Structures are given as structure tokens and as C-alpha cells.
Image (cartoon, rainbow, N blue to C red):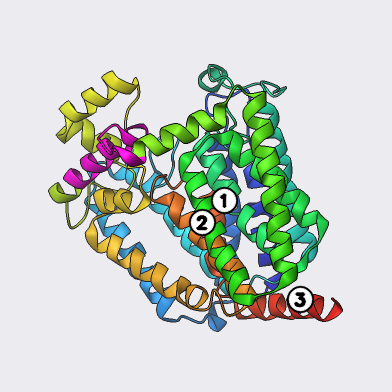
Amino acid sequence: MYKKEATLILTLIAGIMPLIMYPYGDDSYYLPKTIFLYVMCPLLIMILFLNRKKLIIDKKDVTLMFFILFVLISTFFSMDIIISVLGNEVRYEGLIMIIFYGIIYYTAKRYLIIDKKAIGFITVVAIIIAIYSIFQYYDIDPIPKDTYHALINNNSIGTQGNRNFLSTYITLFLPIILGLYILKGRMKFLVAATILFSSLLCTLTRSGWLAFLIYSLIGLIYVIRKNNKSYLKRIGIILMIFTVVTVVINISTGGSITGRGEQFAKDAGTISEYSGSGRIYIWDLAIKITKAHPLLGSGPDTLKYVIEKEFKNEGIVWIQEHNSVIDKAHNEFLQISSTMGIPALLAYLLFLILVINDNLRNIFKNEVSFLFGITIVGYLVQSFFNISVINVAPLFWMLLGASNNIDVIRDLKNDLLINEAIK
């Protein structure tokens, strides 16, 4: 069945890829990770090919194939086929990468097995990246950067190249580790969660903070419904430690946390096209592009080019205001509708609904659904304000697959039950 081989490759993608960077190139963070995926994902395809007679397809997989089919058709009619196949420069999220995401999902769903050493390795990597990003926030960074990133000071980007992407990466680990501390009460989970939370604060990303508030609220509701005194005590400990961490970071950085929080509240109170670092403006433009290309979009990863060609005035206004170009919609769903078309978006949404339905429906009923549920919710919340990137998206698709892997769910349930019995 090649389960061990598939698990090893998936572990390398989740554990090694986030660390990969080449400090001396023009693209230190994204191209090296893309090359790594171009090596690893064909190995997964080879495993599926060797095991092709035993492949099982369900309605979730069929929906995913429809999504990829719509992406393929959009690519065929794209305003720039080469860009749509390979992806835009720096982003690299073209047809090939989307197929890779689907392969990662399917392999994790059918072949992934629980390996505690692998999970530990992936978690340690996340903690290392978080610690590194905290040092960066205090202007301590021994690793050279490319020309562009060298100009950015006091910015926590870890090995992800952008604080928004680091925030998304942290969001895939922090909720599940917090959940494990609440359920198991082990000090190592509390220490890990504190480090990751500190990194999340240092990113100063409001989408990551909003996601944290929402999955924390879900966690609080879960604990209240369980009416477990141990869980409530651990919630209190988390609240106390996280409050101290927030105060320390805020004071030591001249009120950076409260300043960002005030901007968050201001944007929420007075919504305009400049709210959320101009996201409302970008969303409005993405909607216009969707209306202009409703069926097939402009082609995968061609947002930058369709703006240059058909919405030049809007693009110039943005460049004048922000000294940068718009190459993503800063909303994963609008990104799909504008570049791949409404049918592709509907297929993707249906795929998501089918994949996450069981976990969300049972999020307050069992521990495994709770852990998967809050993590998926966290990612989806921030994705409404953020973009899909090759740094993090493969891990999310892997998470979706793992959350639907019968063997993984069984092993996690057994592990949690054993720990509960010991206590």
C-alpha cells in the first residue's frame, strides 16, 4: 500500500518545506519551496500510480476532480496560458500547483498514518520558525535576506517571506496545540502554544488575530459544554500566560500590539475602500473582474495581468497609493472566482463543505472533531482576508486529507481515550 513511503514524503513536505529558503537569491522564500514541491509531489503521484488498482474514489474526490477540471478549462482559455500553468512569478500557484494540492489531499486521506516521531518533528520545526520570527521582531536576524526583504525592518516573517504567510502558518499549529493542552494538560503543549502565540502577536496580522479570537471562542464554548473543571482550569492558565506575554511584547516594542489593535477596531468601525490595508479596494476590483469573466475567470494566477490589461486605471491608483502591484485578491474565494471563474469557486466550496462537514457537525461532540474543526476554522477565517501561497497551502490540503482519513481519526481517538483513562 506504500503507506510508510507516502507518510515519509508528506512529513518532509510539512516539516522540511517551511524551513527551505535561499538567502542569496532574488527569490529567497518562494522559488526554493516550489522546487521542493516539484520534486516531492511527483513521488506521491508515482505512489498513486503504483497502487492504481486499489484506488478508491468517493464523492469528495469527484468534487475535487470537477474543481481541477474547471481550473484546467480556465487555463486552456487563459489570457496567458504559460502563467496559468506555472503560476505568476513569486506565487507559482498555477494549474500544476493546484493539481499538486489535490494529490497531497488525496494521499493524506488514503495513505497517511499516525507517526508520533513525524508529528513531533513537524511541531518542533514550527516552534523553531516561531522563535526565529520573534527574534526578527526585535531586529535580531543573522540570516541574510534578498534585496527586497532586506529593506523591511522589525518584521516577523520567519522563513515564510511575509508576515501574513507566517501568520497563516502559525494558524495551522496554534489551535490544535492549544486544544491538546486543554484535553491532555501536558506542559509541553502549553510551552509550545505560548511560543506560537508570541510569534502570532509579533506578525501584527489582524487576520491571524481575528482567527485566533474565533477558534478560541469555539474552544471556550467546547469547554463550557463539557463542564470539566480540569479543562476550565487550563483555560484560565492559558488566559493568564497569554495576557502576560501580550503585555510584555507590547511594552517592549513601544505599544505595537495596542497600536495595531486600535487600527483593527478603527477599520471595523468605519469600513471604506482603504480598510484592512486596502483590502476592500482589492475585493471590489476582484468582483469587477469576476463580473467581466464569470465562467472561466482570467486564468489561474493571472490577476496581475488582467488588471494591467482591462483595469489599468484601478491598478495605477493602487500603485500610486501603495507603491506595489495587485497580484492576488487577498481573499482566497475571490481569487478563485476572478481568475478561475464562478463554476470553479462553486466546485471548491462544495468540496470544502463535503470535507469539513463531519468535523464541524461534531466539533462539540468528540475530541478529534474538535481539534480538526478549530484548526480548519482558523485557516478559513484568515483565508477570507489573506491569500493562498505555496508556503502554507500544501499543509492545509494535507490537513483536509488527514481530517478525512479513517485510520488517522481512529488512532487519534484511541490515543486521546488512553490518556483520558490514565488520568
Quadrant in the rendering for residue 249: top right
Mark 2: amino acid: Gly
Residue 76 screen position, x and y as percent: 25, 53
Quarter of the rendering occupied by the N terminus: bottom right
| Relative to 349, 40 lies left or right | right
Residue in front for this viewpoint, 65 or 357: 357
Question: Hey, what amino acid is under mark 1?
Answer: Thr
Q: Which residues are magenta?
A: 268-289
Work out whether residue 415 or residue 82 is closer to the camera in this orientation and state it.
415
Element under disc 1:
helix
Asked if the residue at tag 2 contacts the one at tag 1, i.e. Cβ–Cβ closer than 8 Å, the answer is yes
Is residue 129 at all visible to an observer of this figure?
A: no
Q: What label does residue 171 carry, if any? A: 1
Decide if residue 312 is on the left or right side of residue 6: left
| In the image, residue 378 above or below residue 257 | below
Name the N-terminal-most of marks 3 and 1: 1
Quadrant where the C terminus sits is bottom right
Which residue corresponds to the image point at 65% horizontal and 34% vertical from the top-left? 247
Q: Which residue is mark 2?
A: 378
**Counting residues from the N terminus, which is met first, the one under dot 3 or under dot 2?**
2
As measured in the structure, the alpha-carbon distance from the residue carrying label 3 to the one carrying label 1 is 23 Å
User: Which mark identifies residue 415?
Assistant: 3
